[in-house]
Image: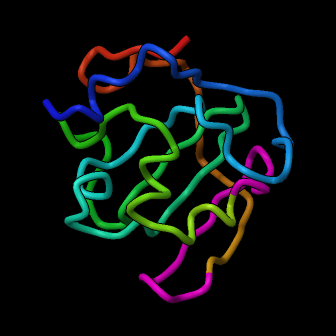
Amino acid sequence: MSARDDDTADMVRRLPWPFPGGRFPPELGAVVARTVISGELPAREVAHAPDGSWLVGDGVTDPNQPAAVVVTHMSHVVERNSSVAELAGLPPGHIANRLGPGRPWNVEILTGYEDDDPPPADGLSLT
């Protein structure tokens, strides 16, 4: 487990939106593909769920597979993928997709999202 996996103490799952200054708050957490946070693959999907939570995927890996995702701060995602910062204004119930780094983000309404509030990956929880 990396230090990024361990820094959940000051993390919150949902915060009032829109964010002040149009920037992700430092304490905002998200469910993130391990491949994105490790730098193995770029972020290609960023979703702001209707419940206010955030999800970041690589567009390739199935996030439902065991150990495919971690809970970490959005700031760590932005460190790896700087263009994700421009998505802080993404409204709840929307998803942004791109083909890869340097490509534009395309925003759509998020469909097929069901929030039964399952426990986050690896038993980590957000307050």
Magenta part of the protein: which range? 88-104
The answer to if 92 sits in the magenta stretch is yes
Residue 45 position (above or below residue 114): below
Task: Look at 77% across and 44% down and name the residue there.
Answer: 92
As drawn, the residue found furthest toward the bottom would be: 103
Residue 97 position (above or below residue 16): below
Residue 46 position (above or below residue 3): below
Quarter occupied by the C terminus: top right
Relative image position of residue 2 (x, y in whole percent)? 17, 34
The answer to if 2 sits in the magenta stretch is no
Quarter of image, res 88:
bottom right
Quarter occupied by the N terminus: top left
Judged left or right of residue 64, residue 110 is: right
Relative image position of residue 47 (x, y in whole percent)? 59, 51
Task: Look at 51% across and 46% down and name the residue there.
Answer: 75
SS assignment for the magenta stretch, majority: loop
Relative image position of residue 9 (x, y in whole percent)? 43, 13
Quarter of image, res 57:
bottom left
Q: How is the image coloured?
A: rainbow
Task: Look at 46% across and 51% down and name the residue there.
Answer: 56
Task: Look at 61% across and 85% down and name the residue there.
Answer: 104
Work out whether residue 22 or residue 35 is closer to the camera in this orientation and state it: 22
As drawn, the residue found furthest toward the left would be: 1
Relative image position of residue 118 (x, y in whole percent)? 44, 18
Judged left or right of residue 104, residue 108 is: right
